Structures are given as C-alpha cells and as structure tokens.
Amino acid sequence: MPNKSRYWFPAKRYGWGWGLPLTWQGWLVMAVFVVLLLGGAVTLLPSHGAGIFVAYTALLSVLLIAVCWLKGERPTWRWGEK
C-alpha cells in the first residue's frame, strides 16, 4: 500500500471550501474549535461584551481556516462530479 498523504479536510463537491473532516485529526481540530468557541461565549460575553467575543471568534475562525488550508485538499470552485 503506498504511503500517500491523506487530507484531513476534503474539498467540497459544490462551491468553494472544505467539507466535514475525513480523519480523526480533522475531527479533533473541529472539536477543539467548538470547545474554544463555547468557552469564549461563556467567559467573554458576560465579562467583556460582544465586541471582544466577535474578535475572539474571528481569530478562532482564521486559525481554523489556516489549518484547513494546510491540511486540506486544495480549494477550488467545484460544480459536482466531473
């Protein structure tokens, strides 16, 4: 069996971007993202307000996109099966 690298996040079938994870590493990244997002909602919203939480969410989203870009299939515009 060849030792080919496996993408954590596949490209979407329609549109641009990535779909649900294929590997346990991808699912772990998604779980950490959700836990950090919920943790930020519980801690930042009551104490610092919505503005800080929006900035925190934007930062987490940029980090998630960076991981998807590095460990996922190359995103291109797709129109379904060829």
Image (cartoon, rainbow, N blue to C red):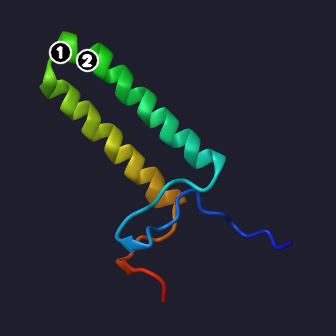
At numbered mark 1, what does the secondary structure look like: helix, strand or loop? Answer: helix
Residue 14, given in percent of the width and then of the height, sits at: 38, 73
Of residues 70 and 16, the one nearer the viewer is: 16
Is 14 placed left or right of 47 in the picture?
A: right
The crowd level at tag 2 (other Cα within 10 Å; few <14, some 14-19, many 20+) is some
Q: Do the numbered discs 1 and 2 sit on residues whose CB atoms are within 8 Å?
A: yes
The crowd level at tag 1 (other Cα within 10 Å; few <14, some 14-19, many 20+) is few
Q: Residue furthest front?
A: 81
Residue at image position (60%, 62%) is: 7
Q: Which residue is mark 2?
A: 44
Query: Mark number for residue 48?
Result: 1
Residue at image position (33%, 47%) is: 62
Relative to 13, residue 7 above or below = above
Is 24 placed left or right of 71 in the picture?
A: right
The quarter of the picture where residue 34 lies is top left
Q: Amino acid at mark 1?
A: His
Of residues 48 and 24, the one nearer the viewer is: 24
Residue 39, given in percent of the width and then of the height, sits at: 38, 20
